[in-house]
Image: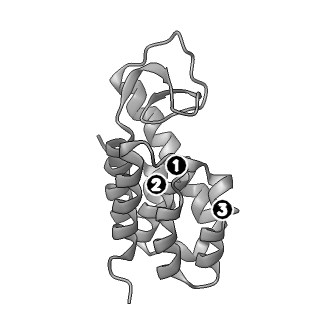
Amino acid sequence: MRLPIRLVAAIGLSAAAILMPTIQGHEGTKLVPYKDPVGKWTDCSGNTLNVDPGRVRTPEECAAIDAEAIARHAEGVLHCLPQLAGHDKQIVAFVDLAYNVGVAKFCGSETAGLIRAGKMREACEAITTWCKECYLPGIRKRRDEMRALCLEGLE
């Protein structure tokens, strides 16, 4: 799938090339709507917007929905944290987190405050504290992977 121009414009080609498969890999893609662990109707790769429980999506629909959702989350994160611009691995890690917990929740968090304060290493370390659902096997692994990615290249 070609990377959506909107996503590339928001975060850059390098981060976009990493972010799309990262989120889709973590979320998986389900064409049939289901209730996620917190009871919210979900389809595609974690989409919770305008999900019709009786409608099965096509792979093409899910690809478009995923691209739009990921772009929307990336734009939201960069809007609240413009200092992330140019920090590709950190963008991927924090957009992945915001995709999972919500942009508003992430942007109002202590983790975002650490980024605003210039404490990037501490913010990366804080990714693993976002583990309300860490009883789910994939969430702990996801947080650990994103923490490691976020820390890459930091001094």
Indicate the secondary structure of the residue bearing disc 3: helix
Q: Position of residue 16 (x, y in %)?
A: 38, 57
Place residue 118 in its image quadrant: bottom right
Quadrant the N terminus occupies: top left
Between 134 and 1, the residue placed more toward the observer is: 134
The answer, for residue 3, to whether it is visible in the render is no
> Mark 3, residues whose alpha carbon is within 10 Å: few (<14), some, or many (≥20)?
some
Residue matched to label 3: 107
| Amino acid tagged 1 | Tyr
Q: Check the image and name the residue furthest to the front.
A: 135
Q: Which residue is mark 1?
A: 99
Is 91 placed above or below 22 here? below
Amino acid carrying label 3: it is Cys
Residue at 46% of width from left, 54% of height from top? 96
Residue 53 visible somewhere in the drawing: yes
Q: Is residue 85 above or below residue 103?
A: below
Decide which of 148, 87 is in the foreground and name it. 148
CA gap, disc 1 and disc 3: 11 Å
Q: Is residue 67 left or right of residue 108?
A: left
Determine the residue positioned at 43% across, 57% down: 8
Query: Element type at marker 2?
Result: helix
By what rule are the colours in the image chosen?
one colour
**Helix or strand or loop: what does disc 1 sit on?**
helix
Which residue in the rendered view is the most extreme toward the bottom? Answer: 155
Quadrant for the C terminus, please.
bottom left
Disc 2 target residue:
96
Tell me the residue at 42%/61% (across/down).
92
Q: In the visual, does 55 lie left or right of 22?
A: right
Instruction: Locate residue 81 relative to residue 54 in the image: left or right.
Output: right
x and y percentages locating residue 128 in the rendered image: 46, 63
Q: How far apart are labels 2 and 3 at the CA level? A: 13 Å
